[in-house]
Amino acid sequence: MSDASGTTRRAKTENHAAAGGTQKSAVTPGTALRRGAARGYQWVLLAFLLLGVVQIFLAGLGVFRLQDQTLGGAGGDTAFAPHRAVGFTLAGVALIILVLAVIARPGTRAIIGSAVLVLLTSLMQSLLAGLADDHAIYGGLHAFDGLLILGIAAYLFVRSRQRES
């Protein structure tokens, strides 16, 4: 739309803002969404790390609760049930982290790291735990993978805090 002088309404608004008038908000819905997703990304990463600490505690509790029972028996299933439940919860939380990372766009490394978290928590941990029933080495790799998962999550959390500063 133009008036008699040929100036568009948008140009008038820009001129008015430049002259010290009321300025339009620089926050668009997209940037507000990204900012909220970035904040959620940080908080969910922190929750993930805290759940990881609980997971390590539950693994130790399960091992020492077994005492003289065999892993394949009913005692093993009962002793590790909380550890298993938190593990599946961590896989779901990792998926939420990935979704928030895609929305927040904190960088390529963060998005790739979040995707790796999903793969390690949902696929690799279950695979290694299942294989550990027959070969103890996979049980060791299951524990190592858990530490790797926490290391990646800690890296992503620290990096997200640095980007904020």
Image (tube, grey):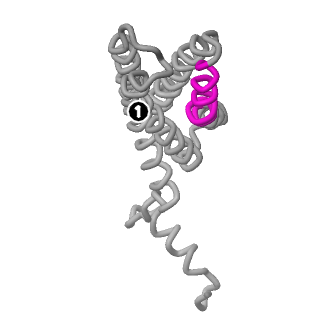
- Quarter of the image for residue 3 reads bottom right
The residue located at (47%, 37%) in the rendering is 88
Whether the magenta-drawn stretch holds residue 56 is answered as no
Please name whichever residue, 70 or 123, is drawn nearer the observer in this view of the structure: 70
Instruction: Report the residue at 45% width, 55% height from top.
Output: 32
Q: State how many labels appear.
A: 1
Instruction: Report x, y in % for residue 111.
Output: 62, 37
Answer few, some or many: residues within 10 Å of disc 1's Cα (few below 14, many 20 plus, some between 14 and 19): some
Vertical relation: 64 (above or below) 122: above
In reply to whether residue 127 is colored magenta, the answer given is yes
In the rendered image of this protein, does residue 32 appear above or below residue 134?
below
Helix, strand or loop status at disc 1: helix
Viewport quadrant of the N terminus? bottom right
- The answer to whether residue 165 of the structure is visible from this angle is no
Q: Quick one: 129 or 115, which is closer to the camera? A: 129
Q: Which residue is mark 1?
A: 86
Q: Position of residue 44 (x, y in %)?
A: 41, 38
125 up-or-down from 89: above or below: above
> In the rendered structure, which segment of residues is drawn in magenta?
117-133
Task: Give percent across and percent down for residue 56.
Answer: 40, 18
Residue 121 location, quadrant: top right
